[in-house]
Image: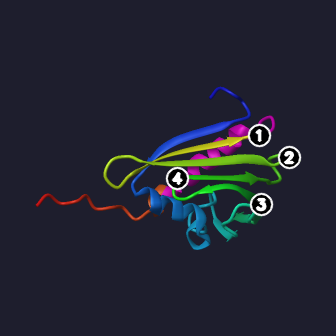
Amino acid sequence: MNDPDVVEIRMRLPAPVAEVFRWWTQPDKLRQWMSPTGTAEAEVDLRVGGALHIVMKSGGVTIHHTGEYIEIEAPNRLVFTWVSPYTGPEPSLVTIELEPDGEGATRLRLIHSGLPGQAALSHRSGWTTMLDRLATCLPVQEAKRAR
């Protein structure tokens, strides 16, 4: 994608699709990685029309992010709106696509669209850092042993 208002990130994660999906949808798991630095609080009402609330805290700064679930196709697709002080007056849209990639791994594609002006650059950095945190939090799957 070459749209300056869209962030697209692809990465391989060392866990099965269903496990990665849980880390995107369960508050106790989101709290462990959903902030580029510092800590996160998370509230999730996982249903179409349900609310998402993430509070990122770092260095005395608190940033509230809210959203609404638009699509939930467990465990392969999740779409939600994203509103923060840095995304402008209209909600932006986050799409998460998960596909199996080899034995016990997942290909993740994140698309964050509808970002105003310079917000895409900072959001690319933020999402990249958070996805790196997610990768370190996931339980690594042991390769199946040949018998």
Quarter of the view holding residue 68? bottom right
Give the numbered dot on residue 114.
1
- Whether the residues at callouts 3 and 4 have beta carbons within 8 Å, the answer is no
N-terminal of the two: label 3 or label 2?
3
Q: Which residue is mark 3?
A: 66
Which residue, given by chain and number where applicable, does mark 4 sit on? 76
- Tag 4, which secondary structure? loop
Residue 108 colored magenta? no
> Quadrant where the N terminus lies?
top right
Question: Which comes before the other along the chain, label 4 or label 1?
Answer: 4
What's the CA distance linking mark 3 and mark 2?
A: 12 Å
The crowd level at tag 4 (other Cα within 10 Å; few <14, some 14-19, many 20+) is: some
Q: What residue do we see at 75% from left, 53% from top?
A: 82
**Sooner in the amino-acid sequence: mark 1 or mark 2:** 2
Residue 84: x and y in percent read 80, 54
Of the image marks 4 and 2, the number of the one nearer the N terminus: 4
Residue at 10% x, 61% y is 147
Q: Which mark is residue 90?
A: 2
Whether tag 1 and tag 2 are in contact, CB under 8 A, the answer is yes
CA gap, disc 3 and disc 1? 15 Å
Relative height, residue 116 to residue 84 (above, below):
above
Magenta stretch: give its range: 116-134
At label 1, the amino acid type is Gly
Three-letter residue code for mark 4: Asn
Q: Nearer the viewer, residue 86 or 48?
A: 48
